[in-house]
Image (spheres, rainbow, N blue to C red):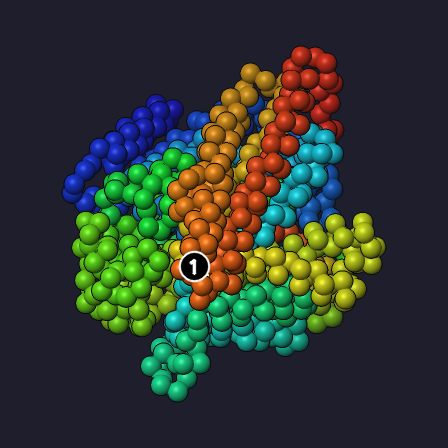
Amino acid sequence: MKKILGRILWVVLSVVAALCLAGISLNRGEPINSIWLVLAAACTYLLGFRFYAKFIAAKVMVLNNDRATPSERLRNGHDFEPTNKWILFGHHFAAIAGPGPLVGPVLAAQFGYLPGTLWIIIGAVLGGAVQDFVILFSSLRRDGKSLGQMAREEIGKVGGLTALLTVLFIMIILLAVVALVVVNALKGSPWGTFTIAATMPIAIFMGLYLRYWRPGKVLECSVLGFILVVLGILAGQWVSVSSSIAPVFTLSGVALAIAVIVYGFLASALPVWLLLAPRDYLSTFVKLGVVLMLGVGILFVRPQMQLPAFTRFIDGSGPIFAGKIFPFCFITIACGAISGFHSLISSGTTPKMFAKEWHAWPVGYGSMLLESFVAIMAMIAACVLQPGIYFAVNSPGGVVGATPEAAVATVSSWGFPVTTSDMAGLARQVGEQSLFSRTGGAPSLALGMAHIFAKGGGGQAILAFWYHFAIMFEALFILTVIDAGTRVGRFMLQDFLSHIYKPLGRTSWLPGVILTSALIVLAWGYFLYQGVRDPLGGINSLWPLFGIANQLLAAIALCVATTIFIKMHRARYLWITCIPLVWLITVTFTAACQKIFSSDPRIGFLAQADRLESVVESGVAAANLAEMQTLIFNARLDAMVCGIFLLLVTTILVDSFRIWVGILRGTREARVTEAPFVLSRLRPEEL
Amino acid sequence: MKQFKTVCQLLLDFVRELGDQNAYQRYLAIHSRKHSREEWQRFCAERLSAKYQRAKCC
């Protein structure tokens, strides 16, 4: 009876998923309710989890609970510790959830809600969650080895070194682009800038509190930190209306970029307990809390989607970023559907904490589905805004015009009516001076979230609080990505430079620490500065670069996974990793080639450089010749970075392909590097 | 009621895991030491230096 009921339930879920997907796909003209998206995603995820992921776990990976996991065999109470699967699920989700799935869908909403939503759902079920799951499994069977180590062992030295270099380059672009999101969110906003500035002394206070006054009381300290941050948001309102203090916190993009660069350097060079760790604790709790709040808010409010299913910008003429729906929608969504960075997390801490192999099923596959659900929520938050407001906020001044009148005229001419009084009224409501051209995705996401939260409780009266609360939430964990990323980049650079001069590799040698921190900060800082000065808002060039890099890293992870499957004699299941791999290669190579070679200056970096050069040659830009020369150099640099990404990934692809063909032809030994089988003796009560 | 208690305990364990408090208890148990400011500082030095050698996800 129970079995029959179970089957009926899955049939009902399949019907609901099909109806909801058809509903959101076929609906045109009238706004639909966001609950359709929530149901379509939730039902598809459940089906994918129950059937597809379980098939992979049982038939391909052959997970075995009798096999002792690394946490049991190598148990040391530190990294290797058997952990309850639900705790590990939350832990892994907290580790993979970053700003990407929040910002990407907001930007991709320029095509309308449908393309992005479908890709988030399908991409996660068939690509992103599969990648996370197979890498987690591979690392689990190899005592928690990292992606780089697995690439070196499974593919070869060239593959390993290329993977490491790719990660370093991606890190630089990632840090620049997320820093740009923060800068654009805080530009000209004394309230937001004050709130974020206040989190620095709060974090230092927390660091000192934990180290000297109440050692070990992390939860107590985090609650205290959260109260102080909320007080900071409330104080920010007072700051924003104070004629004497507001100007101090009303900063330009360049000033904010310099501030973020200095912060990145300090966070990388200072002891971790003082600034980085307390911020990280606080940001993790706030991140999980806000994601939960947003989910509950959407279910409670069930807002209408205001953006249409498709906009006119699917033809590539989008104001937020240029390029057609294929490949740029997929590049822009990035982490919400498939994220290469997850392969670094899946081959890090988590595999060392599994008590049983089958726990990898909910943790590896399920966590990514939850992350994808966060992306759906971000898409909803962006699409509940009036389209005119969404485009006026997200379009750079260089596209819509520098004045409010020009901007509303341009946006309205696209068929998305908006007036200067609409924008001024909204800015007043959320306590901002202006909401025009606040590119980067964070302000429009914060607006959408504030609307949902305000409808859930408090109404329009506290819209300003919720808006700044959302900005604080985004900036807080983006800055945590920046400080931790800079530190990791520093370690990687120290590792490379130690081959040239040995002391540079010592993490305790101060000159080495300062030099490598400065080099990493300068590397991403340069791209950040370039983005801030870009007349098209920076996001147009940097976000696609980040998307391409991230997806190429996913391609590397899938190459490693495919190699492992072949070595495990699972060649007949290769389609599981090869379908997403072929798709990723097609999308990223098309996008990268277009970004380098497209003749449209809004898309192609080289065409952009040529156009600027012709302007310089014509003498029109004689007054700002130096700036034009910098823009030309930047466009060529971006083209070169894009080319380097392609070259690195081509190297790994060719190297992997050589090995696959060798093993399948029988000319190469299929040597599996798994840890040997040991019978598990872990008792349930030990968890 | 029992299930509710279990869920609450699980949630508490989860936040304690995120806040490294469980890891600290394990550290004390393994080394047979008692909680003190110095022990916490020693634990942090080990734990945090390993934790922040890994990238944060995007």
Element type where label 1 sits in the image: loop
Which of A215 and A384 lies nearest the eye of the viewer?
A384
Q: Residue at x 67, y 66 (%)?
A: A269
Residue A45's quadrant in the figure? top left
For residue B6, above or below residue A458: above
Which of A183 and A337 lies nearest the eye of the viewer?
A183
Q: Residue at x 70, y 53 (%)?
A: A493
Horizontal and vertical percent position of residue A611: 43, 49
Q: Residue furthest right?
A: A502
| Left-right relation of A511 to A351 | right
Which of A414 and A490 lies nearest the eye of the viewer?
A414
| Number of on-image labels | 1
* Residue at the spot of label 1: A619
Residue A289's quadrant in the figure? bottom left
Horizontal and vertical percent position of residue A110: 31, 47
Q: Disc 1 is attached to a residue of which chain?
A: A
Q: Residues within 10 Å of mark 1 (few under 14, many from 20)?
A: few
Q: Residue furthest left?
A: A30
For residue A369, above or below residue B27: above
Q: Residue at x 70, y 12 (%)?
A: A666
For residue A120, above or below residue A396: above
| Left-right relation of A659 to A336 | right
Q: Residue at x 53, y 70 (%)?
A: A259
Q: Amino acid at mark 1?
A: Gly
